[in-house]
Image (tube, rainbow, N blue to C red):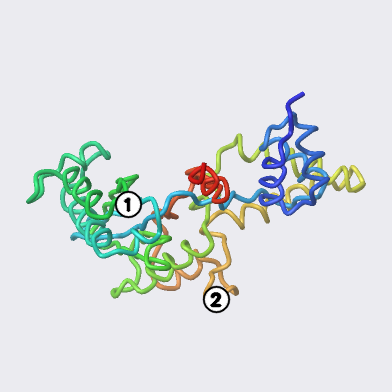
Amino acid sequence: MAEIKAAQVMELRKKSGAGIMDAKKALVASDGDMDKAMDYLREKGIAKAAKKSDRVAAEGLADIAVSGNTAAIVELNSETDFVAASDPFKDLLKKVTKLISENKPANVEEALAMKTENGTLNDDLISTTQKTGEKISLRRFAVVEKNDNDSFGAYLHQGGQIAALVVLEGGNEDAAAAKDVAMHVAAINPEFMTRDDVSQDRLDHEREVFKEETLNEGKPAKIVDKIVEGRLNKFLSQICLADQDFVKNPDQTVAEFVSANDGKLKSFIRYEVGEGIEKKQDDFAQEVKDQMN
């Protein structure tokens, strides 16, 4: 049996909202597998829905630039938020995002090789690293194309901690609807555009979890399937952009809001700076102690 560490218990508590003992029991039952432990808690009715971990590690900012029918969304990383707030970092981010929107590189390697007045973009990153004293890195980007009758919606939250880029087919002329949808995407963080985008494996998995949860609640067998489908539909309405309650008007879904503005959802991208990167945990007391020895 795998050893269950306190850090694992705390991570599961953070993701599920479960108590310490419930989280530890779930990890023991699943031999330390975090995903299986989350399912265990959901089946027992202790955690109602899986939540993404919010352990955002790397610092930095994201930005969006539009060049005609092309838009680019970019994440640039630094080691501290202090440097991310500095003018050299912000100036570089603007430059990188503009260059990518204009040149449309296929990947980070191609982006770093783009020509600039200082040589290449990689040379610019090295130069800014030397100025700030911290490693500056281009983590990721996406280039998005639209048609003439489409509209871009771009939104930056907290100066670029979260960036959302939306494309609507049609939409009102001033693209206000597209920007409102981008704000919604930044705030609510949908996983999919529509239910059709959810894989059958994911549907089968969630249906099985809801079935175990319902059976454990002691519901009559003859109504279990009906309850499961109801819970699955509710779950899908929470993770699919089209079906989510619009953040600025919960009386209509996002799809209904877009339709009322003569548009149709086409695509969305959301970046949250540092998501998925494990942050180094510094022990300040130990650091001081080591320096004194």
Q: Residues within 10 Å of mark 1 (few under 14, many from 20)?
A: many
Q: Is residue 64 left or right of residue 277?
A: left
Q: Quadrant of residue 65?
A: bottom left
- In the foreground, 26 or 196: 26
Amino acid type at mark 2: Asn
Instruction: Give the SS element for disc 1.
Output: strand
Which of 231 and 154 lies nearest the eye of the viewer?
Answer: 154
Q: Nearer the viewer, mark 1 or mark 2?
A: 1
Q: How many badges with numbers are in the image?
A: 2
The image position of residue 246, as x and y in percent, is 54, 69
In this rendered view, identify the residue nearer to me: 179 or 281.
281
In the displayed structure image, the side of residue 125 where residue 269 appears, left or right: right
What amino acid is labelled 1 in the image? Leu
Question: Distance between the Cα atoms at labels 1 and 2?
Answer: 33 Å
Image side of residue 122 versus residue 181, left or right: left
Q: Which mark is residue 76?
A: 1
Residue at the location (29% across, 74% down)?
173
